[in-house]
């Protein structure tokens, strides 16, 4: 039933590659958790600093390199789902449904588990004198990070797990991995739900 509802992913990824990917995700999650425990919540002006954008670019460049190494010798377009969906109209509908689901989950969890507060990235107020740094960070957070994370989780992650388990389990494991990746305790449930919802969209549209 799950295959009918969510769709099938055809490329196969070896268990060794999946194990290396899982170890990498866990290592990043542990590092993020340790950094948060040691340093506490980030300063509210972190998005007004150019160093934040530069650091983010370096981190995501490393992540992308790791993913590219993991798929070396494989069909990149197939493994990462770098293809147009069969139907743009249906894909648009699934993306909108996914965003609506994310909004609902956020509304339900926010009173109890405030993911935004746990991440601590939202500035207290607008500081026009730091507009340049804010724009640079916006590009990293809203463009670079989503692209790399989609390729990492909904690209490789979905394809790799689909080689061993059914689509429902794929959604569950990719969601958990996405939550672990961020190393946040309070925001874990919201991030895992976000990762799972986007995994469903990926399976239904056959594309990242």
Image (cartoon, rainbow, N blue to C red):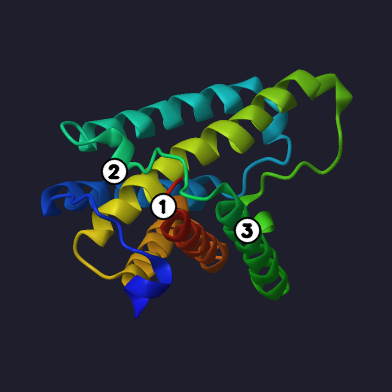
Q: Residue 153 appears at what percent x and percent y?
A: 39, 50
Q: Residue 189 appears at what percent x and percent y?
A: 53, 68
Task: Residue at 64% x, 70% y: name it.
Answer: 105
Task: Residue at 52% x, 63% y: name it.
Answer: 197
Task: Residue at 22% x, 49% y: name it.
Answer: 11
* SS class, disc 3: helix
Comes first in the chain, label 1 or label 2: 2
Q: Residue 79 got which mark?
A: 2
* SS class, disc 1: loop
Residue 203 left/right relative to 48: left
Q: Residue 206 got which mark?
A: 1
Q: Quadrant of residue 108?
A: bottom right
Task: Residue at 18% x, 49% y: name it.
Answer: 13
Q: Residue 59 got which mark?
A: none
**Figure quadrant of the N terminus:** bottom left
Residue identifier under label 3: 93
Instruction: Decide which of 184, 105 is in the foreground and name it.
Output: 105
Q: Residue furthest bottom?
A: 1
Give the spatial CA distance, label 1 vs label 2. Answer: 11 Å
| Within-10-Å neighbours for mark 2: few <14, some 14–19, many 20+ | many
**Count of number-bearing discs:** 3
Instruction: Decide which of 201, 67 is in the foreground and name it.
Output: 201
| Within-10-Å neighbours for mark 1: few <14, some 14–19, many 20+ | many
* SS class, disc 2: helix
């Amino acid at each position: 039933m799950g295959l009918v509802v969510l769709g099938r992913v055809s490329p196969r990824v070896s268990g060794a590659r999946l194990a290396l990917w899982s170890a990498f995700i866990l290592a990043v999650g542990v590092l993020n958790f340790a950094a948060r425990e040691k340093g506490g919540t980030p300063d509210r002006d972190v998005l007004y600093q150019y160093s934040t954008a530069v650091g983010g670019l370096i981190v995501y460049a490393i992540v992308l390199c790791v993913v590219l190494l993991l798929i070396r010798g494989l069909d990149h377009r197939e493994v990462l789902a770098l293809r147009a969906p069969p139907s743009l109209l249906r894909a648009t509908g699934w993306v909108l449904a996914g965003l609506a689901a994310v909004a609902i989950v956020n509304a339900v969890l926010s009173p109890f588990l405030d993911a935004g507060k746990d991440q601590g990235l939202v500035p207290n107020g607008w500081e026009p004198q730091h507009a340049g740094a804010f724009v640079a960070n916006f590009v990293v957070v809203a463009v670079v990070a989503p692209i790399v994370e989609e390729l990492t989780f909904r690209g490789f992650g979905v394809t790799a797990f689909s080689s061993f388990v059914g689509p429902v389990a794929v959604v569950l494991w990719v969601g958990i991995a996405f939550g672990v990746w961020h190393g946040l305790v309070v925001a874990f449930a919201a991030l895992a739900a976000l990762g799972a919802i986007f995994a469903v969209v990926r399976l239904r549209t056959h594309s990242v």
